[in-house]
Amino acid sequence: MNQYIAETLNDLSEIAASISDEYKDDQIFAFYGKMGSGKTTLIKEICGHKGVMGNITSPTFALINEYITNKKEILYHFDFYRIETPEEVFDFGYEDYFFSGNICLIEWPELIENLLPEKYIKIIIEEKENGVRYISCNKVVN
């Protein structure tokens, strides 16, 4: 397990680079944390480190955004905060994305945890009262 401390949001860029380098061979990243803990901000930084071109936004209403890197690689960014049933995830064909071999960055994975692949990176962000964020990364293999 890797652990990081972000004293400010500015520290997330360096942490994102470390996560990207450490887990460069992994595709599925599940981001856990309360609302406002920095999940989307960390994902934006990871996308930037991977060379994503264009605007990176949370897919809160669309459920999924697709990004292209400067190397023509595809990254998928999911936000499952608004889903009400797992059937919604089946309806848009989540398997096509999760098993595509492309990087998948998933916010609010606890709502679809039983659908995650056997192997993924679990990233937990805990924000303390003083704004410091504790980030832990753990490779999960079921």
Image (spheres, grey):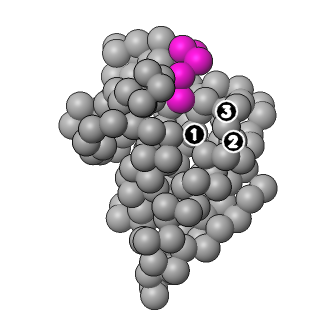
| Residue 80 visible in the displayed image | no
Q: The residue tagged with tag 3: helix, strand or loop? A: loop
Residue 106: image location, x then y, percent: 47, 39
Kind of residue at disc 3: Asp
Residue shown at 58% from the left, 61% from the top: 15
Is 76 displayed left or right of 140 in the figure? left
Q: Residue furthest bottom?
A: 130
Nearest to the observer: residue 73 or residue 96: 73
Dot 2 falls on a residue whose secondary structure is loop
Q: Position of residue 33 (x, y in %)?
A: 48, 59
Q: Amino acid under label 2?
A: Tyr
Q: Quadrant of the N terminus?
A: bottom right
Q: Which residue is mark 2?
A: 23
Q: Of 71 and 3, which appears nearest the observer?
A: 71
| 131, above or below 52, in the image | below
Question: Dot 3 corresponds to which residue?
Answer: 26
The image quadrant of residue 91 is top left
